[in-house]
Image: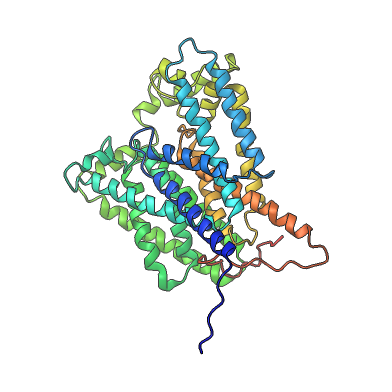
Amino acid sequence: MTAQAPELPRAAVNARLVALISGAAVSFGVFLSGFVINEPAPYELYMAGLIAVWALFGLRISRAVTPLLVLLVIFNIGGLISMSQMGELYNTPLYLAVSLFLAFTAVFFAAVTEARPGIYKLIFMAWLAAALATAALGILGYFNAFPGAGVFTRYDRAAGAFEDPNVFGPFLTLPGIWLLYRLLTGSPLRMVLYAVPLVIIAAGIFFSFSRGAWGLFAASSVLLVACLFLQSASGLFRLRIVVMTVAAIVLLILAVLVILQIPGVADMFTARARFAQDYDSDRLGRFARYGIGFAMAMEHPLGIGPLNFGRIYGEDTHDIWLKALLDYGWLGFAAYAVLIGWTLAAGFRILFRARPWQPYFLCAYVVLIGHVALGTIIDTDHWRHFYLLLGLVWGGIALEQRHQRALRLQPLVAAPPPPPAQGVPAPRGSSLLSSA
C-alpha cells in the first residue's frame, strides 16, 4: 500500500488561506495606486475599506511604527490649525481628510510589512504590474495609437492613468529601480526578463517629459549602484557593477538618440530639458514665489490655510517644505521635518544589514531619498505612492527593531544569519553587510 502524506492541521490550512487572501488584498490595493485619472480614485475607496476591515481583524501598530503615526497626525493637526485662519473654507476639509487618509495608508503599509515581511515581494510585484500597465497606456497615448488614446496624455506628454505627467513619471521609478537591481544582481540568463519591462518603464518616464521624473530616476539609479558597490567586498561583483553600468549608460544614450529622430519628440525634449521654464523665472514664477511664500510664512506661524497660496498667486508653492509652512503651519512643518530626518537617519543606519527584506528596503530607501529631494521643486503631500514608500521604509525599520529584540532574547546563543529573501538574489561577496 502507498503511504499517504499526512494532512496539514486545520489551523495551518486556515492560516495559509488567511495569508493568501490578505496578501492578495494588499497587492490589489497597490495595483490600484497606478490608476488615478479622477479623484476620488478607486484606490482611496478600496484602501479605506481595506484598512477598516484589517483594523477590525487585528491591525497592530507596534512601538516601532508609532513615531510614524504620531508625526503624521501632528502634521495634519497643523493643517487643521491652519484651516482655522481661513475666512472661507472652500474644499479644505476634504483636502485635509485626504491628507489624513494618506497618512493612515503609510502607517498601514508599515504595519503589514512588519507583521509579514514576505508581503514586500507581493507589494513590489503589484507595483510593477501597475507601472507596466500605466506606462504602456502613457506610451500608446503619446503616439495616439488608437482612437481616444489622447485621454492618457496631458499637455502633449504621456500621463498614463494619472491626472498629471509629473506624478506619472515618479510613480514608475520604484519598479524601474527594482528591475535595475535585479539586472545588476540576478542571473545573466534572466536578464531579458528584467530588461524588457525596464525598457517599457524607462520609455514611460522619458515620454512623460517630466524633468523631476528624469532627475528622480537618474538619482535613484546612481544611489542604487553606489550602495551595491559599497556593500559588496567582491572585486568580481564590483567589476560586474561597473561594466553593466557603463553598458547601460551607453545603451541609454543610443536609445535617446534614436527616439529623438521621431518627429516632434526632439522639439519637446529640447523645450523640457531646459533648467528653467518661463513659468519658473517669470516675475511671479516658481522661483519668485519661493521668496514670497517664505516671507509670508514668517508672518503667519499658524499658516494661511491649505491651498490658499495658490488662490492668491494663481499657482501652488511647488515646494513641499514651503507648502508645509504655509498649509500646515510651523507645527506641521516641524513634524514633517522631524519625520523626514528620522526616516532617512534610521533607514541609513540599517541600510547595509543582511536581512531577507534588505533588497526591497534598499530600493524603497533610495527612491524615497529621491522623492525627498524632488519635493524641493514640487508638492508631494498628496502623492499616494510617496506614502507607500514611507510605509515600506518604516516597515523595514520596525522589522530591524524586532530582529534586534529577538537577538537580545537569545543570550549565549549565536544567531545564524537570516536566509536570503525568496526569489531575490543577494549581492555577491557581501562581507561588508552587518548581520547585527
| Quarter of the picture holding the C terminus | bottom right
Can residue 159 be seen here? The reply is yes
Q: Residue at x 52, y 65 (%)?
A: 424
Along the line of sight, the residue nearer the viewer: 14 or 47: 14
Provide residue 250's location: percent of width, then percent of height.
Answer: 38, 60
Name the residue at the right extreme: 412
| Residue 348 in view in this figure | no
Picture residue at 38% right of the left edge, 36% below the top: 41
Task: Give the number of marks.
Answer: 0
Query: In terms of image quadrants, where is residue 179?
Result: bottom left
Rendering colour mode: rainbow
Identify the image quadrant of residue 94.
top left
Relative to 367, residue 8 above or below: below
Question: Residue lying farthest top?
Answer: 87
**Residue depicted at x 32% and y 41%:** 159
Q: Taking 277 as reference, is 10 left or right?
A: right
The image quarter in which residue 253 lies: bottom left
Location of residue 254 with respect to 185 vertically, above or below: above
Most distant residue in the left direction: 147
Q: Position of residue 75 (x, y in %)?
A: 59, 29
- Residues 280 and 315: in front is 315
What residue sits 40% from the left and 19% below the top?
284
Q: Is residue 12 left or right of residue 315?
A: right
Q: Position of residue 258 (x, y in %)?
A: 26, 55
